[in-house]
């Protein structure tokens, strides 16, 4: 099949785009050797590389938030220690579950 016959039925806006096509000018395989990574350090073969599942942006924002709030946490802990009585625990034991166990 000739190139002209192959390209004949294709819809085009400008036919001169295909008139300059030459198969010889298409990328030729070069004789250059491909670049290869050569490690500078020797790593153990049993080393396992694990990728983080969280997004880089989310991880960065969490780190910034932790840095920002670390000072606030320290201030609260110091204030509680100086005040004498520690704050009550945030979680309170459920009393209804004990009552349910007594009924059965």
Image (tube, grey):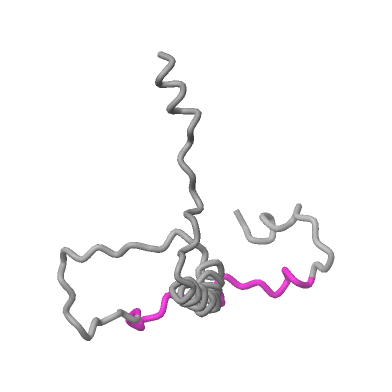
Furthest toward the right, the residue is 13
Q: Which residue is nearer to you in this view: 34 or 15?
A: 34
Q: Is residue 3 left or right of residue 76?
A: right
Furthest toward the top, the residue is 104
Q: Is residue 29 on the magenta stretch?
A: yes
Residue 17, horizontal then vertical, whole percent:
75, 71
Magenta stretch, residue numbers: 16-34
Q: Which residue is nearer to you in this view: 41 or 70?
A: 70
Q: Residue at x 76, y 52 (%)?
A: 9
Count the marks: how many?
Answer: 0
Q: Residue at x 40, y 21 (%)?
A: 101
Q: Is residue 32 left or right of residue 14?
A: left
- Please tell me in which quadrant of the rendered image residue 36 appears: bottom left
| Quadrant where the C terminus is found in the figure | top left
Q: Which residue is nearer to you in this view: 59 or 67?
A: 67
Furthest toward the bottom, the residue is 40
- Please tell me in which quadrant of the rendered image residue 35 appears: bottom left
Residue 78, horizontal then vertical, whole percent:
46, 77
State whether residue 47 appears in this view.
yes
Q: Is residue 33 on the magenta stretch?
A: yes
State whether residue 24 appears in this view.
no
Residue 102, horizontal then vertical, whole percent:
40, 19
Residue 69, horizontal then vertical, whole percent:
54, 74
Q: Which residue is nearer to you in this view: 100 or 18?
A: 100
Magenta stretch: dominant SS? loop
């Amino acid at each position: 099949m000739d190139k002209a016959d192959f390209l004949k039925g294709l819809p085009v806006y400008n036919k001169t785009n295909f008139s300059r096509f030459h198969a010889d000018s298409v990328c030729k395989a070069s004789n250059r050797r491909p670049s290869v990574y050569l490690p500078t350090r020797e790593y153990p073969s049993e080393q396992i590389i694990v990728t983080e599942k969280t997004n880089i942006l989310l991880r960065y924002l969490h780190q910034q938030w932790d840095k920002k709030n670390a000072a606030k946490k320290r201030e609260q802990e110091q204030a509680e220690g100086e005040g004498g009585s520690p704050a009550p625990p945030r979680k309170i034991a459920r009393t209804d579950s004990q009552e349910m166990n007594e009924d059965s």
